[in-house]
Image (tube, rainbow, N blue to C red):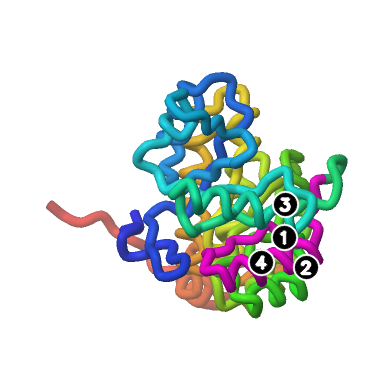
Amino acid sequence: MIDHNDDPLVIAGRPWRSRLIVGTGKYKTTEEMQAAIAASGAEIVTVALRRVELRPGQPSMLDALQGYTLLPNTAGCYTAEEALRTARLARELGMTDFVKLEVIADQKTLLPEAEETLKAAKILVKEGFVVLPYTNDDPIMAKKLEDAGCAAVMPLAAPIGSGLGIRNPFNIRLILESAKVPVIVDAGVGTASDAAIALELGCDAILMNTAIAAAREPVRMAEAMKLGVQAGRLAFLAGRMAPKLYASASSPIGGLIASHAPGAAIASVEPKQA
């Protein structure tokens, strides 16, 4: 098994052992959320600021996430201005300078609003935030976000919550080809094989929520996702064999073919004498 301490996920110079980032939404209970996050092995947990109760003296979901690195999320924002306000609020609350930047285009598709995302990213970077932007699988936009100073780029696999898996692995490969920052697949995975594929492609990590929370048994699915990510990373590091059009025997039979060629004598094997 790979030593994850020797193969960390590094974002903005900070290392993590786990390459799985999970969310906190859609769970039936707080206890189920806690158990699933623990089973996932994740160290970074996203939190949508709009869903967090922040009344003084009142219980908060943040109380249930002690020990994890929180990644504030600007989910639910439709403009750069809304996203900026949400990120700044997280900083004022003393949460972190890391932010998952999410600016969506419309309620139906929840696809990224590319221009507003880029606009907000440029401002947040200038203000000292470590920006991880949710974006579409467009290699050009991914490059623009990297050039703007984002610490990672997070292209979608498929629309948020769809569970469709990686719809366009070719665009993901194009993003990976030019990116010099971590590439984290965000949104759209449905099961552990999707996670494995993302890591096999060479993605540095994967972020998910619904695929775990909406599973019949979220805690089991969380563990499956952990193992899928680990398997995909191991396969990527190992380097897969080159695909071939025709069959290739797995057993070395070159010597047998030579000795059994037409006209060749076949030696008999006598049992050893005691």
Between circles 1 and 2, the one closer to the viewer is 1
Amino acid tagged 4: Ala
Which label is found at residue 82? 3
Residue 124's spot in the image, x, y percent?
A: 61, 66
Between circles 4 and 3, the one closer to the viewer is 3
Residue 193's spot in the image, x, y percent?
A: 61, 46
Q: Which span is picked out in magenta? A: 110-135
Compare marks 4 and 1 and give the one earlier in the sequence.
4
Say which residue appears at 40% left-offset and 43% top-offset. Answer: 68
Between circles 2 and 4, the one closer to the viewer is 4
Rate crowding at label 3 as few (under 14), some (14 to 19) or many (20 or more) other CA atoms within 10 Å.
some
> Gap in Å between the C-alphas at discs 1 and 2?
8 Å
Which label is found at residue 138? 2
Say which residue appears at 56% left-offset and 68% top-offset. Answer: 127
> Which residue carries the number 1 mark?
135
Asked if residue 130 lies in the magenta stretch, the reply is yes
Can residue 241 be seen here? The reply is no
| Secondary element type, mark 4 | helix
Say which residue appears at 59% left-offset and 61% top-offset. Answer: 132
Q: Residue placed farthest to the left in the image?
A: 274
Counting labels gives: 4
